[in-house]
Each structure stands twice: as structure tokens, then as C-alpha cells.
Amino acid sequence: MRARLFSILLFLGGCFNAGASHIVGGEITYRHLGSFSYEIKLTLFVDCQNGSPQAIADDLNARIGVFDGSSGQLLTTLSREVRRTGPTRVQKLNYNCVRNLPNQCVDKYEYTFTQTLAQRTGGYFLSFQRCCRNQIISNIYDPGFTGANYWTYIPQVNGSGGRGFNSSPVFKELPPNFLCTNAWLNFDHSATDADNDSLSYEFFTPYIAGDRNDPRPTFNNYDRPPFDTLQWIGSYNYANPMDGNPKFKIDPETGRLTGIPTREGQYVVGIKVKEYRNGVLIGETKRDYQFYVYRCIVDVVSAFYAPNYQCGYRVAFNNQSQGAQRYRWDFGVAGRSDDTSNLTNPVFDYPGPGLYRIKLIAFRSNCVDSSDMTVQVYPPRYPDLGPDTLICGAFTYTLRVKESGFQYNWNTTQTGMSINVNRGGLYWVEKVDGRCRWRDTIVITNDLSRVRVTGDTVICNERPFTATLDAGAGYRRYTWSNGSPNRSIQATQVGSYWVETENSNGCITRDTARIDQYPELILSLRDTTICPGTSTFRDAGNPGATYAWSDGQSTRVAEFKNPGTYSVIVRRDKCSENGSFVLNQHAPELELGPDTAFCGNVNRRLAPLFGRNFQTYRWNGDVSDPVLTVTLPGKYYLRVTTQNGCIENDSVNIVLNPLPQFRLPPDTNICLSAVLELDPGPYSAYRWQDGDDKRTKKTFDAGLYAVEVTDENGCKNSDSMQVEKDPSKLPSEMYVPSAFTPNGDGWNDVFPGHGFRSDDGFYEMKVFNRWGEKLWEANKPALNWDGRIKDQIVPEGVYIYMVNWIGCDNRRRSLSGNVSVLK
């Protein structure tokens, strides 16, 4: 698409002729004339009050571009410039009693031509593009710079995807030239179709083309499909194009446009009619129109609502008129004069099906306004499911309608003339007859009540018995298998007993009870306590029974090792018996404690904790004393016999770790200025003589330095050294020569060459040339300059030196002077 320079044009807007802002609306339609010939018509609506006369005159001819439906390419040989006919003044008034008619003028022009459009894959697009819309439009962005694009599409005729020849729908009415605020609009915006295709209606977003620089673009500058749409402003959109309460809407089936505008202004509205053939969309007609909303002074407005089609002969009418003092309704029954009413909201019973045109006349003083609409009345055609019914017990029941040829929808989501149901409840069927839907309802009461005899029993002993069998209350008849008519009976023998009952709905049900008797089950289990690591057995008795122990065992005799509560269910015949026992375990008594690590040597007396008195002791299979003294690392085992006779075992591991091995330097005598850094090596923890826990220690002062280290095993070791400080150990003064000869003869080759020594005290010497550039430096007195810079001996001459140092007596000194380089 061509870029539209909105921001630039907005700035330059005053520099261009705004005479093209005259377009109110437009549409393109086509009619099939036979073979591949079509009559094409562009309808253009212009503002004949405020529009530029020059712009209107410029549109004597309209450029209608024809585009390939697949590629969007302009077909120049088919595109045409067409001369207009007209104008026809649009004087559609929707209100009869307006006291202040607006000075609003709209003219309609038509551009009609005949064009042969041969069969083409993808069909054709036809487009008229023109700028600009009115600057005063209220619902779009930058209207004075926004053009219009009125276009249509002619579908492919035959071949793959073809739909056959087609004529587009044509709107029946011209749009109104103005609307009144706060007055009901009920406008028939429907269309006709020459092919009798199905039509539906909706709003759409209008299209744009052209700009203020090129208001009447040539074909070469036409936008190609797909086309761009305009930009709505604020809360407006295609479905809400203007302010209204109720909001404007268009009936998708009838094309009737309704609503009450609430705000003055100019509003662009897009209304589209879509045509369907055999359920497939084949074409559209799009009317892009600017509605003028005016604050009218209206004496009376006639308006009402009724459904466009009515299923049944009774129709209710909703009067929405304004300012009326009285009404007269004509319900449109031909040949009758009594089909009228003076009521505000009447209800009328039509004599039969048909299409009726209703008219409402609203009166106020000497002003009269009328409105009309048509209603299609369909005869009532209710389905018949028959009367409500009662069904006893479980069932399958067929619900059926009799009249075929219609669609039936059931509340079970099923469709068709019949369904099968198997439960009680409310069922309805909806009969679809065109646009009408009719229902019938049936209630199926399902009596699922059943007699339930209480007293069924199994007697698990061999003693005489008397059992009561009861059928429950609420029945009007009882019949027992022994002939009793009573609610309950007494049974003294084993066997089956049945009863038949009849309830208040006449439903008959039967139930059976049985009494059985078997020998008694005897179960005896006892609690016990065992030693750790041992087991015990339990016998559930009762030969011929089945057994279900709580730990999953299923034998008569079961083994148990772990302490806890165990249960068993014993079953035989129809009898069962439960039993349980508690299995305890003597608490362990032997405990040697945790494994122990020693540093350097082992010396440990091993004995059981808590001072238990055991019957026997056995250490490592040999020693039988209660206490064992160990001096070597290793694993030691003890086996004891407790006072309960239980055998217990425990062991302990004795580990021997070496002491940390390190040495501080030997005792030493150093200069007062010297500082040694003592480092015992990498260990887990450190403790120096002054409590410091760092790894290293510096000897700032004379005295004894001692450290204790701890390794990763927790073993400790220590060492110490004596540091003495002597300020006269080394000379503190320094001699610097005044010249040297770096000629490599072995005599006086380096500078300063003074032999000064220091116990790592501070020392710094620098040499400069006469321009202050640093030539050499050293931070140790043993370092000397060989007179070279970058491997080249410096020229003969005088050089400057500076030296700073701390002597053995810990005093800072400095010296500077000249040194001569001789060769």
C-alpha cells in the first residue's frame, strides 16, 4: 500500500486546497446482463451545502479501477473513467414534526457503465478512490486528511472455486439526510437481490484511499487490494459508530437500523449486506455513509417495536414514540376495519399466517407522525408428547412426536422424532419450523421405591434363636411367604423368607431375607515380649477357616519378628471372628558409644555405657572382662548376654591420627627495622601467644613468638622462637660515589656499588637525567645500575640520584646528589 504521510500532511494542511472535503458517502453495485457482461454503478453522495463547488465539479468523471482478484494487480485495459448523471437531492425525512429543520443538503450522483469481465481465476475487485472526507467528522482520526475507498468484488464465475454469475444486492432506500438527537430512528436499510440469494446485514469499518497531496489519484497511484481501513477515534468502532441510548444496531436478518442518537455531530457509518448462495458467501455491497446528527426540536415521533416474524397469532407491540398525546394503530389485516387500536402498547390476535404491514400514527396537537413495519406471522405448530406418566421400577421408555418433516431438538441434546429415556424427570422437545420454535413438555414420574426386609442374619453359634424380619412401614399391603399379612414376622428356623408389598402408587415389589446358623469360631491370642533379632509364632486355630493377618500373612500359624500390634480375621462359612495381640521387644541394653579418634597415641578403657550388669562378656571373641584397656588403633567388638537372656553385639572403632608437623624458624637477632613474617603452614586453626587466630604473624617487636595449630582431625601441636632486635647489627649510614665507568673493564662498572646491607628494611633509589626523566630505580640495596637504558649506555655526563632508606636503627634517611658517567 502507498504510505500515507499523516504527520507531515497535518503540519502542511494549511498549504493545500481543502476543496476535496465534500464526500458524504458512496457504494458500488453491479448487475449481470448476460454472458460476461455487467452493468457497474458507482453511487456517490456529496455535501451540497458545505462541500467545495470546485471539488464537486472535479468529480464530473470518476475513475473506477479494476483489479485482478488473485494478485491485486491493476488491470489498466479494464479500468475506466465514467461520466456521472444527476444530481438527485436526498430529502429522506424520518421525522414529520421537526420545528427547526437543519440546513443540510445531500446530492446523489451515479456513474454507470457496462463492462465485459471475462472468466478470471480469483474474480475482480472494482474500486473508486477519492480524498477527502469532511474535517468536522466526529468519530474518526484526522478526517480532513482521510480519503474514501468504495469498492466491491465480483466473484469467479466458473472453474475451481467459481460460484456462477451473480448480481450484487442493492439497498432499497436512500439513507436519511439527517438524524435527530433523542428521537427514535427506525429505518429500513434492507436490500433486494436479483438472484434471490439469502441476505444478512452488519456494520463494518469503512475503507480509505488517497491523501491531500493527491486527492484524485490516477490509476497508477490507486491502492491495491487488500485495502486499508480508517482509524476510529476514542471508544468508537465499527459496531459502535455513534453515540446512542439505546445504541445503534442493525438487524442481521431484516436490515432494519434502530437506535436513538444522543450527541450532535457527523458520523461515518459502514453498513454491509452479505449475500449467500447455498450457504456460501458469494458477495457483499458496502455502503459507506456520513450521518449528520442534529439537535432537533421535535413535537412528536412515531416509533414502535415488534418482532419481524411472530411464531403464533398473538403479537405484542412495544410503543417507543415520543411526545404523542394519542395513537392509532392499523394492524394490516386486509378486508377488515376492526384491526385497529388506540392503546399505547396493544396486543393483537391475527386471524391466520401471513405478512402484515403495521402502521402507527402518533398525534400531538396539529402535528402527526407515522411509522410502519412488516411482521411475518407463522401458525402455531406445537409438538405433542402426550400426558405426564408414572412408571414403577427400572424402565426404558420411548418419547415420540408424530409429525414428520421438521427438526426436533430434545433437552437431552438429542435430535430426531423419538428418543429413549430410562429415568424420571422433565423432558421437552423443541420443534423447529423455519424461524419458529415450539415446545411440549412431559413429566415422567419414576417410582423406584422397593421394599427392604430387615432382619437378615447369620447366627454363629448352635443355640436356639428367634429373629424378627420387618418389611418397613408405608405400604398398603403385605404378603409373606408364610402367609402372614403383617408388617413383620418372627422366624425360629434357618431358611429364606420373602415378602411382597404394594405402595400407594400401586407399585408392587418383593424382597427376600435369609437366616443361617453355623458353629462358633474360637480365637485365643496372647501378648508377649521377645529379644531383638528373634521371632515368635501365633496359632489362630479353627481348622477349615481362612485367615487374614494384618501384616499380609494368610496361614493358620504365622511368624512375627517386629514389635507392634497384630490382628487377624478368621472366616468360616458366613461367620468371622477378630483377634489381636501385642508383640513387645526388650529394649537394647548394650552401648559402647561412638567411634573415637586419638592424636599421637592411644590410651582408652572400653566398657559398656550406663553400667549394665550383663551375664557374660566377650571382647573380640577372647577377653571376658567387663572392661578392656586398648593402646592400639583398630575395631573392638563386644558380645554380651543380658539379664533377659538376650544376646547383643556392639563395636567401636579407635582411630590414631598423627600430630601436625611444623617448625618455626630458629631464634634470631635482626635489625630494629626488620620484620619477619612467621607462617606455620596450612592448617584448620591457629592460636598465637597473643591470642591471634590468623595463619601468619609479623615480628614487629622483640620477644617470644609461639603458635599452636590444629589440623583437620582436631590434632594440635605447637612451636616457638625468640626474636631479638639490635639497632647496631648492621651499619645505618650509606656511602654513594660521585662517578662510575660502565665500560665493562671490571672496575667501577656499576652505581652505586656501595655494599650497603639491610635486613629487609625500606630502601628506594632513583636516577634522573638533567631534564627530570627517570632512568633507573631499585628497591633493594644489592641492586646496581649498569649505566644502560634499553641496552644502550647513556652518554657521558652528570646525572642526579635520590635515595631513601631506613637504617638498622629504624630511622628514616635520605640522600641526593650528582653522579658522573665516564667512559
Image: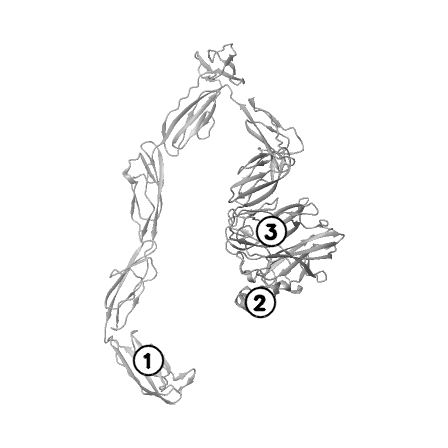
Q: Quadrant of the C terminus?
A: bottom left
Mark 1: few/some/many CA within 10 Å (<14, 14-19, 20+): many
Label 1: element kind: strand
Mark 3: few/some/many CA within 10 Å (<14, 14-19, 20+): few
The residue nearer to you, when weighing 536 against 92, is: 92
User: Do the CB atoms of the residues marked 2 and 3 lie less than 8 Å apart?
Assistant: no
Side of 256 where 516 appears, left or right: left
The residue nearer to you, when weighing 651 against 323, is: 323
Label ID, residue 17: 2
Seen in the picture, residue 769 relative to 500 is either above or below; the reply is below
Using the numbered discs, state the Cα–Cα distance from disc 2 to disc 1 in whole angstroms.
Answer: 89 Å
Task: Report which quarter residue 221 is drawn in.
Answer: bottom right
Q: Quadrant of the N terminus?
A: bottom right
User: Do the CB atoms of the residues marked 2 and 1 lie less than 8 Å apart?
Assistant: no
Label 2: element kind: loop
Residue 640 visible somewhere in the drawing: yes
Quickly name the residue at label 1: 765
Quickly name the residue at label 3: 92
Name the front one of labels 2 and 1: 2
Rendering coords of residue 629 (x, y %)? 29, 45
User: Do the CB atoms of the residues marked 3 and 1 lie less than 8 Å apart?
Assistant: no
The residue nearer to you, when weighing 739 against 416, is: 416
Label 3: element kind: loop
Label ID, residue 579: none
Three-letter residue code for mark 2: Asn
Query: Which residue is outermost to the right?
Result: 35
